[in-house]
């Protein structure tokens, strides 16, 4: 057990911010020992880590964080749905277009999902996001072949990323792992692609002498 000042110090979250999270209901109350004193435990540290992940890494507004916290605290909600609440909150909002190009791209996304046997909700935000990307690629005259990327994503998520989510641990720890994995591993993968692109360009075209 710890006082709120120690909770602040151990979590790295400023004391006024911890008190704000308590007022907003993002952080559950401590064990009340007196009118002006409460004790906190490791569950509060985990919750603060989750809030920081959602706020600093996921860039979510307080309203979105509240929605995820509510899912975490609802023990009757299945873990899959809880994780989906977090993942959907991280996805950009994309409005479907009433156009032939959109319908064609959406059908291709559906075919890709069916080809890999993915169990995806019909209104999953990533469906609309991927559809929008395909529409833009076609509009720019690009040949859009997503299968190599789908294969890489399927392997990385099933063999690496999901193995890092502690499904049998505290619910907030599972959400934190999913958020960090989704955002940070996504950024790491993009950075790795750029490194490989530079390397391949140097091998194929030769590196200018000025660059060493």
Image: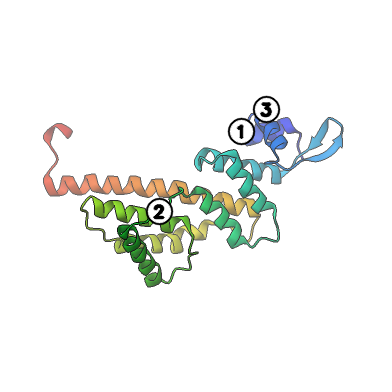
Q: Number of numbered discs present?
A: 3
Residue 46 in the image: state x and y as whole percent.
65, 45
| 152 relative to 122 in the view: left or right | left
Q: Could you say which disc has been placed on residue 209 in the image?
A: none
The residue pinned by badge 1 equals: 12
Lower position in the chain sequence, tag 2 or tag 1: 1
Give the Cα distance between marks 3 and 1.
Answer: 12 Å
The residue depicted at 41 percent of the width and 56 percent of the height is 128
Relative depth, front residue between 107 and 55: 107
| 99 relative to 43 in the view: left or right | left
The residue pinned by badge 3 equals: 16
Mark in the foreground, 3 or 2: 2
Mark in the foreground, 3 or 1: 3
- Residue 94 seen: yes
Residue 175 in the image: state x and y as whole percent.
58, 52
The residue depicted at 48 percent of the width and 59 percent of the height is 124
Instruction: Name the element at disc 1.
Output: loop
Give the image quarter of residue 50: top right
- Residue 50 seen: no
Give the Cα distance between marks 2 and 1.
Answer: 35 Å
């Amino acid at each position: 057990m710890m006082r709120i000042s120690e909770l602040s110090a151990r979590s790295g979250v400023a004391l006024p911010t911890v008190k704000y999270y308590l007022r907003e209901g993002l952080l559950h109350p401590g064990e009340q020992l007196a009118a002006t004193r409460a004790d906190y435990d490791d569950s509060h540290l985990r919750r603060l880590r989750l809030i920081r992940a959602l706020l600093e890494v996921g860039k979510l507004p307080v309203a979105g964080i509240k929605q995820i916290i509510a899912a975490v605290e609802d023990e009757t909600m299945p873990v899959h749905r809880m994780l989906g609440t977090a993942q959907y909150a991280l996805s950009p909002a994309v409005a479907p277009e009433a156009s032939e190009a959109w319908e064609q791209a959406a059908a291709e996304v559906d075919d890709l999902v069916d080809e890999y046997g993915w169990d995806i909700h019909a209104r999953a935000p990533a469906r609309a996001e991927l559809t929008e990307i395909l529409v833009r690629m076609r509009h720019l005259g690009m040949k859009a072949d997503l299968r190599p990327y789908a294969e890489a994503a399927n392997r990385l998520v099933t063999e690496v990323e999901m193995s890092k989510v502690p499904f049998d641990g505290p619910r907030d720890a599972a959400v934190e792992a999913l958020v960090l994995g989704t955002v940070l591993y996504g950024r790491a993968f993009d950075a790795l692609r750029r490194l490989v692109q530079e390397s391949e360009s140097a091998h194929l075209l030769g590196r200018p002498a000025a660059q060493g």
